[in-house]
Amino acid sequence: MTSLLGSSFCQAMMMMTMKRERSAAILGLVFVCLTAVLPGSRGADVDVQAELQELRDMIRTLTKLTMVQQEFIEERIRSDGQSGIKQLRHDTEGTRTYYGSTHIDYSTAAIHDHSDYVRAVGMGETIAVMNGVEFRTRHNDYRLVRASTTSNDFLATEDLDFPPVPPEVTDKDSVQEQIAELREWFLAFHNQNDSHRNYHDYFRPVLCYMEGMWINDTDSEMTEPFPSDRHFLDASSWEDLMTKVRYMAYTGLKDNLENLAFLPRKIMSVSDDGHPHIAQWLYRILCHPIQGDLPTRYLRQREDWSYSYPRGRNQKSVLASRGARFQISEFEEDKFTDFSLLDELMQGIPGVDNTPSASLARGYAGDLYPGNSSGQEHTLQEGFYHRWYKFARKGAMGSAFAHVGFSDEPLFMAVTSQERVVPLAAESCNNNGRQCVSHSTRVTYAMPLEVIYLTPLLSWNPYNISYNETAGTSRQDSRDGSTDSLAFLGSDSETYYRTPVDFFSGGSVEADVADTVRATVKVLDSQNVVRDVTASGTRVILPAIEGQEIRLRYPVPPIHMEGSSVWKEVNVIKDYLTENGGDDDGDGD
Ligand SMILES: *[C@@H]1O[C@H](CO)[C@@H](O)[C@H](O)[C@H]1NC(C)=O
Ligand SMILES: *[C@@H]1O[C@H](CO)[C@@H](O)[C@H](O)[C@H]1NC(C)=O
Ligand SMILES: *[C@@H]1O[C@H](CO)[C@@H](O)[C@H](O)[C@H]1NC(C)=O
Ligand SMILES: *[C@@H]1O[C@H](CO)[C@@H](O)[C@H](O)[C@H]1NC(C)=O
Ligand SMILES: *[C@@H]1O[C@H](CO)[C@@H](O)[C@H](O)[C@H]1NC(C)=O
C-alpha cells in the first residue's frame, strides 16, 4: 500500500520534473522512485539498471522526435513563402476581406512618427518569418542605433551619427535666412538635384534591418534584444513572456501597451544522455549607414492593391501616403538578376560579432567567394550579411553560384562566434568517407526593413535651444509647451523640439493615432526667450516645404507570402493588367 502511494507520488514528481525539461533530475528521481517501489535484492538492482537505461533511451528518442517535429514545422513555413513580414494586428476591416489589415494597415509595417524623440522611429507590432521561424514582435519603436564599432559584446550598439548642417546654412546671420537656405537643401534632396545644392553629405541614408537568431537559453534572465525609448518586453523571464503571450492567445485579450512578443523556444539539440539544449528565438532592429549615396530612384514603389483599391488611391497618391511600400533596386527595367545593389548594401552590415574577423567561416564546404566575384582573390566575408555566394567548384546542377537557404530570396545570413548564439555541428567527409571533420557553426539571420534618410534637421539648432540627454528634464514643473509660461526648458531625448515652425509651410502629414508629435510647442531657448518650434526627430513624410512633401522613410520589408508561387502568379496578373491598358494602379477607375 505504502509503495503504491509512493509510486503515484513519484509519478507526479516525475511529471512535474519532466515539464521543466531537466532530464538529469528526471533520471535521478526515476532511480530513487524505482528503488523505493522495487524490493531491494541484488537481482532487482540489475533490473533497475536495465529499466533505467530503457527509460533513458525512451526519453532521448521522444526528445529527438520533438526536435524533428519542430524542424518539420520550420521546413513547412520556409516553403510556404519567404522571410518577411506576414501580418499586422487586425485594426481595419470592411465589407470585403481586403479592407482588413495585411502587411499594411494605416501604414506599411505599421510605421509611424515619434519625431518628438531624438532617436525613436515608430513601428508597431508585426508577425514576421525568418528562415521558417514565425514570430510576433512587440511594438517595435526602434532607435537610430547601429552595431557597435568598438565593442564585441553580445548585442552591443552605438548611436548613429547625425549628418551636420551645411555651413552655407549656419553662416547666415538671421534665423529667417537660415530657414530660407536650408529649405533649398531639402528641395535639392527631394528633386535629387545636386547642382542646385550638393546635398549628398547632409542627407545620409541608413539601411534598417531585422535580425533574428537562436540564443542559448541558459539563464532565466531575459535579454532585452534592442533599445526603444517607448517599449520593452514586459516579462520577468522567457517563460513568463511565453505564459503571458499564451494567455493572450487563449483569452483573446490584447496587451494594451503592446509590450509582449511571441518568440519561440525549441529543442536545439539532444545530447547522448538525452539532455535537451533549449534555444530561445531573439530578434532586433538596427540600422546601418550606407556608404556613399543611395539615389531615391533606386527605391522603387511596389503595388499593394489591397491597400490602394479600397481607398480609391492611385500609385501617386499611395506614394504620398504611409501605405507606400518600396523595393531596393538599381534596375529600371524588370529582368532576371543575381548579385545586386541590395547584396552589396547588406554585405556591409556585420553579424553579431560587430567587427567580424576575416577568418570567420562555416568551413563545411571549404572556401566560399562573394556572389559578385569573378575570380578567387578574396573569400566571402561570412561574418557579414550575405545571400548570393560562390563555391570554388561547380555543384550538382553545374553552377558554382548559390543562395543561402533553399528558396528564400530576401534572407541574409552571417556567421558569428558569439557564445550566446547556439551552434549546430555536422561532419563533412572526404576520401570516400574515411576522413571526417566536424564543423560547429553559429549563424544569425537578417532581412531589410527600411531605408531612412537622416537629415540636417536632426542637428540644426538655430535658436540655440539647450539639450539634455536625460528624458523629462525639459518637462520639469509640469511644463507641457502649450503656453509661454509652460514653455519647455530646452530639449531632451524625448522632447526634441528645435525646428522653427516657419520652416514648414504645412502641418503634419497623414497623422496616425500612434504618433506622439505635436505640431507647434513653445520652448525656452538658452537666452530664456520663448520660441515656437516643431519636432526635429525622424518623420515618415515631412510637412510641406514650399508645397513639397518630402519622404524620409522608405519601408522595404519583404512580404512572407510574396515568396509563394501563388503570389508570384498574382504579381504577373497585376503587371499584365497594368501593361495592357487595364487598371494600372488599383484605384478602381
Ligand atoms: C537643378 O538645379 C539647377 C540649379 O538650381 C537648375 O538650374 C536646374 O534646372 C535643376 N534641374 C532640374 C532637373 O530641375
Ligand atoms: C550555453 O552557454 C554556456 C555558457 O554561457 C555554455 O557553457 C553551454 O555549453 C552553452 N550551451 C550550448 C548548448 O551551447
Ligand atoms: C563586390 O561587392 C563589394 C561590396 O560588397 C565590393 O566592395 C567589391 O568591389 C565588388 N567586387 C566586384 C568584383 O565587383
Ligand atoms: C548657445 O547657448 C550656450 C549656453 O547653452 C551659450 O554658451 C552659447 O554662447 C550660445 N551660442 C549662441 C550662438 O548664442
Ligand atoms: C541634465 O539633467 C540632469 C537631471 O536633471 C542634471 O543632473 C544634469 O546636470 C543635466 N545636464 C546638463 C548638461 O544640463
Image: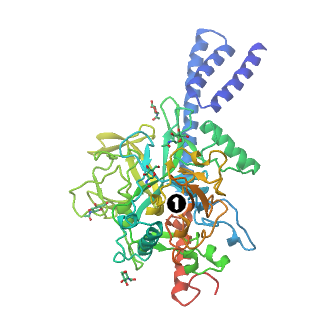
Give above or below for 281 relative to 56.
below
Rate crowding at label 1 as few (under 14), some (14 to 19) or many (20 or more) other CA atoms within 10 Å: many
Task: Give the residue at mark 1.
Answer: 536
> Residue placed farthest to the top in the image?
41
Total marks placed: 1
Q: Quadrant of ligand 3?
A: bottom left
Q: Which image quarter is the N terminus in?
A: top right
Considering the numbered disc 1 on the image, is that residue within a helix, a strand or a loop? loop
Camera sees residue 115: yes
**Amino acid at circle 1:** Ser
Foreground residue among 51 and 168 = 168
Q: Position of residue 116 (x, y in %)?
A: 57, 57
> Residue placed farthest to the bottom in the image?
581
Camera sees residue 136: no
Q: Position of residue 317 (x, y in %)?
A: 58, 79
Foreground residue among 78 and 92 = 92
Residue that appears at 58% across and 37% down: 62
Residue that appears at 62% across and 36% down: 236
> For residue 182, which quarter of the picture?
bottom left
Residue that appears at 34% across and 71% down: 198
Foreground residue among 521 and 1 = 521
Q: Position of residue 453 (x, y in %)?
A: 45, 64
Q: Which image quarter is the C terminus in?
A: bottom right
Give above or below for 213 relative to 217.
below
Q: Position of residue 341 (x, y in %)?
A: 36, 67
Q: How did the renderer colour the structure?
A: rainbow
